[in-house]
Image (spheres, rainbow, N blue to C red):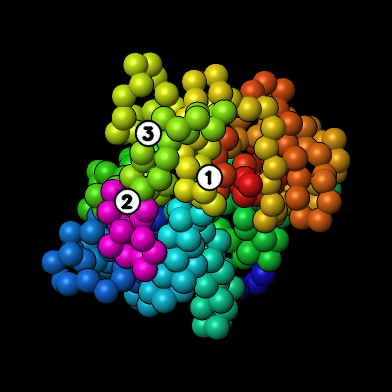
Amino acid sequence: MSSRKVMLGMSGGVDSSVAAAILLQQGYEVIGVTLQIWQDMDEEAKKSEGGCCSLSAVDDARRVANKLGIPYYVLNFKDIFNKTVIEYFKEEYFKGRTPNPCIACNRHVKWQAMLDKAVAMGIDYIATGHYAKVMLDPASGRYILKKSVTDKKDQTYALYNLTQEQLGRTLMPVGDYSKEQIREIAKEIGLSVATKPDSQEICFINDNDYGRFLSENSDKKIVPGKFVDTKGNVLGTHKGIVHYTVGQRKGLGIAFGKPMFVVALDAENNRVVLGDDNEVFSDTLTASDLNFISIEKPVDGMRVNAKIRYSAKEAPATIRVIGGQKIRVVFDTPQRAITPGQSVVFYNDDVVVGGGTID
């Protein structure tokens, strides 16, 4: 595209702040925005929220924008965030699944909604401070998503849902740098956020207590049920399936005389299935809600490296197409705690092939 205008999502952190500086250096006209996604709360609560789009983030982002001399706006995306992230998060937990709200936010808010707003304002590109790289593959004519130069901070796992149209309008300038280099650039140009710690928690649950959040923010009741083993024998009473996830050992609230792990969540019967550590491993999963980037659609029998959660290591696997919008993934070696609701993402070396939601 001929335009050099770009709307940059600014979280108030060092990565998006340096992204602004890099884009300016590359000759872009940068418009900084922070997405207002915090829900109804009093002023003190807003200020204490430590997430990527809180009031404190707005203050930091505005200071950086002033320092760099770029225009800055706060966009009200509260309703779409509530609908596509918070409501999804609640529904998945009550279904006995473990959602990934950051992936949902990237898909529906940070990309689609922000890109729609940018286009409406006559801006051709959006940009973020994510550690990833977007390139055009001349052989296929497709935009591809590649890992950042540093595996330690690579964020491609949370970006596998981006479409060709979105990738063609996306700039990710920090993907060519390590975190240490980004902080050094921030220091050199005198940005106040140079040493600001990374945000870790889910932005709308600052104390990380999912159970409390769900009980206070849902019309659905959290109902106690039965712990059972993999043969269906009753072992005790759990406090509600939303408090558990596959692979969990600590915090079960009951002693068995040996380590026991959550093997599955049976929402229909309100049961938490427990087993030994070896029963948490599986070599197969099915996935739906698919999106492929480097290819148009999966080929039956294709080989990939698959990642079943953000912190997991990639593992060799084979994709089997099972009709419609579903695939089966067969791993060469069993994987620990394959979790419904999380995403499986496929790689070919440093290129994101695509991914889907684990069923």
Q: Residue at x 63, y 27 (%)?
A: 282
x%, y% of residue 29?
48, 70
The N terminus - image quarter: bottom right
Mark yes or no: residue 185 visible: no
Residue type of the residue flagged with mark 2: Gly
x%, y% of residue 23?
47, 59
Q: Which residue is mark 2?
A: 211
Residue 143 located left or right of residue 127 = right
Vertical relation: 274 (above or below) 65? above
Mark number, residue 99: none
Q: Nearer the viewer, mark 2 or mark 3?
A: 3
Residue 147 located left or right of residue 259 = right
Q: CA distance from mark 2 to mark 1?
A: 17 Å
Q: Residue at x 47, y 48 (%)?
A: 270
Q: Earlier in the sequence, mark 2 or mark 3?
A: 2
Vertical relation: 343 (above or below) 350? below
- Circle 2: element type: helix
Q: Which residue is mark 3?
A: 236
Mark yes or no: residue 73 visible: yes
Vertical relation: 36 (above or below) 49? below
Quarter of the rendering containing residue 230? top right
Residue at the extreme right of the image, as rendered? 300
* Contact flag, marks 2 and 1 (Cβ < 8 Å): no
Q: Which residues are magenta?
A: 209-223
* Contact flag, marks 2 and 3 (Cβ < 8 Å): no
Residue type of the residue flagged with mark 1: Asp
Mark number, residue 266: 1
Give whichever of 316, 192 is nearer the camera. Answer: 316
Quarter of the rendering containing residue 213? bottom left
Give whichever of 141, 95 is nearer the camera. Answer: 95
